[in-house]
Image (cartoon, rainbow, N blue to C red):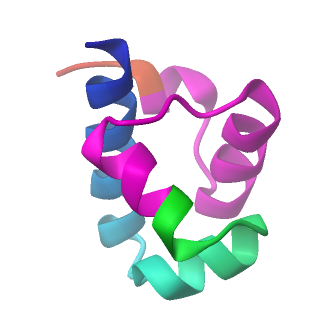
């Protein structure tokens, strides 16, 4: 369940910032298939990857995890 929430939030912020999956995966240094698995909730991102996600998107970890 937690993986699904991470994935939805990452996808939402990625789209808000105008990144395609391909562009975003390249910035993160991961494959598009891994990013897709994360966004679908099939894979939990590592702490290292979450740090890269927040840096790339220009958001805090708190913003990424908060549910409004």
Q: Quadrant of the C terminus?
A: top left
Span shown in magenta = 35-64
Quarter holding residue 34: bottom right
41 to the left or right of 53 = left
Residue 19 at least partly seen? no
Q: Count the marks: how many?
A: 0
Q: Where is residue 48 in the image (x, y as percent from the top left)?
A: 82, 35
Above or below, comparing residue 35 to residue 63 in the picture? below
Is 67 located above or below residue 15 in the figure? Answer: above
Q: What predominant SS class does the magenta segment belong to?
A: helix
Q: In this rendering, does residue 67 appear at all?
A: yes
Residue at the left extreme of this rendering: 68
- Judge whether residue 29 is colored magenta: no
In the rendered image, the quadrant that contains the N terminus is: top left
| Percent position of residue 14, x then y | 41, 64
Quick check: 53 left or right of 11? right
Judged left or right of residue 26, residue 12 is: left
- As displayed, is residue 18 above or below residue 45? below
Q: Which residue is located at x 51 percent, y 28 percent?
A: 44
Q: Where is residue 6 in the image (x, y as percent from the top left)?
A: 39, 30
Q: Does the magenta stretch include residue 40?
A: yes
Which picture quadrant has residue 51?
Answer: top right
x and y percentages locating residue 67 in the rendered image: 24, 19
Q: Residue at x 70, y 30 (%)?
A: 46
**Residue at image coords 73%, 42%:** 49
Q: In this view, does 10 lie above or below 23?
A: above
Residue drawn at x 31%, y 67% as measured from the top left: 16
**Hey, which quadrant is residue 50 in on the image?**
top right
Q: Which sits in the foreground, 62 or 23?
A: 23
């Amino acid at each position: 369940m937690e993986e699904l929430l991470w994935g939805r939030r990452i996808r939402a912020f990625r789209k808000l910032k105008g990144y395609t999956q391909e562009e975003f995966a390249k910035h993160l240094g991961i494959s598009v298939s891994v990013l897709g698995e994360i966004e679908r909730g099939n894979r939990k991102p590592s702490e290292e990857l979450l740090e890269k996600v927040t840096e790339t998107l220009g958001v805090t970890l708190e913003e990424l995890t908060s549910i409004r």
